[in-house]
Image (cartoon, helix red, strand yellow):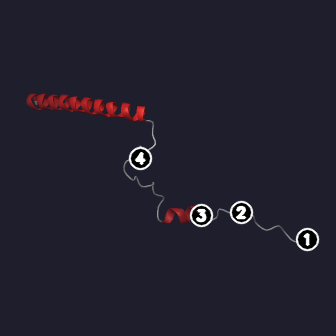
């Protein structure tokens, strides 16, 4: 009776994978909203608009604070 042959080995695979570096998958821009629930998309539109408005207000507030700091210093 002959000896069993090796079924599996992971030898050298990690080294081979790291030679060119393990990279994150590239982001290809916007994710398609095709086939997504219309009710959710409509709500998302208003959410994004609200976030932008809030972000602009915060930006203006920070600008005013920085201006005040610059004048006092």
Residue 63: give x, y in percent of width and height. 16, 32
Q: Which residue does the numbered mark 4 point to in the structure image?
A: 32
Relative to residue 9, is residue 33 depicted above or below?
above
Point out which mark residue 13 bears.
3
Q: Which residue does the numbered mark 2 point to in the structure image?
A: 8
Q: Earlier in the sequence, mark 2 or mark 4?
A: 2
Q: Earlier in the sequence, mark 4 or mark 1?
A: 1
Residue 55: give x, y in percent of width and height. 26, 32
Q: Which residue does the numbered mark 1 point to in the structure image?
A: 1
Left or right placement of residue 70 versus residue 25 in this view: left
Relative to residue 23, is residue 33 depicted above or below?
above
User: Separation of disc 3 and disc 2 at Cα?
Assistant: 12 Å
Q: Nearer the viewer, mark 4 or mark 3?
A: 4
Q: Nearer the viewer, mark 4 or mark 1?
A: 4
SS assignment at label 4: loop
Please give the name of the residue rendered at 21% of the width and 29% of the height, measured from the top-left corner: 57
Residue neighbourhood size for the residue with mark 4, other residues' Cα within 10 Å, grouped as few (<14), some (14–19), many (≥20) = few
User: Separation of disc 4 and disc 3 at Cα?
Assistant: 35 Å
Please give the name of the residue rendered at 65% of the width and 62% of the height, measured from the top-left corner: 10
Q: Earlier in the sequence, mark 3 or mark 1?
A: 1
Please give the name of the residue rendered at 82% of the width and 67% of the height, measured from the top-left corner: 4
Residue 17: give x, y in percent of width and height. 53, 63
Image quarter (top left, top right, bottom left or bottom right) of the C terminus: top left
Please give the name of the residue rendered at 91% of the width and 71% of the height, measured from the top-left corner: 1
Q: Earlier in the sequence, mark 3 or mark 2?
A: 2
User: Separation of disc 1 and disc 2 at Cα?
Assistant: 21 Å
User: Separation of disc 2 and disc 4 at Cα?
Assistant: 40 Å
Q: Earlier in the sequence, mark 1 or mark 2?
A: 1
User: Separation of disc 4 and disc 1 at Cα?
Assistant: 60 Å
SS assignment at label 3: helix
């Amino acid at each position: 009776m002959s000896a069993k042959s090796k079924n599996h080995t992971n030898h050298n695979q990690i080294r081979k994978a790291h030679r060119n570096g393990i990279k994150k998958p590239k982001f290809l821009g916007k994710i398609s909203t095709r086939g997504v629930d219309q009710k959710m998309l409509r709500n998302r539109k208003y959410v994004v608009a609200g976030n932008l408005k809030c972000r602009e207000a915060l930006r203006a507030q920070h600008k005013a604070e920085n201006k005040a700091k610059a004048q006092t210093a």
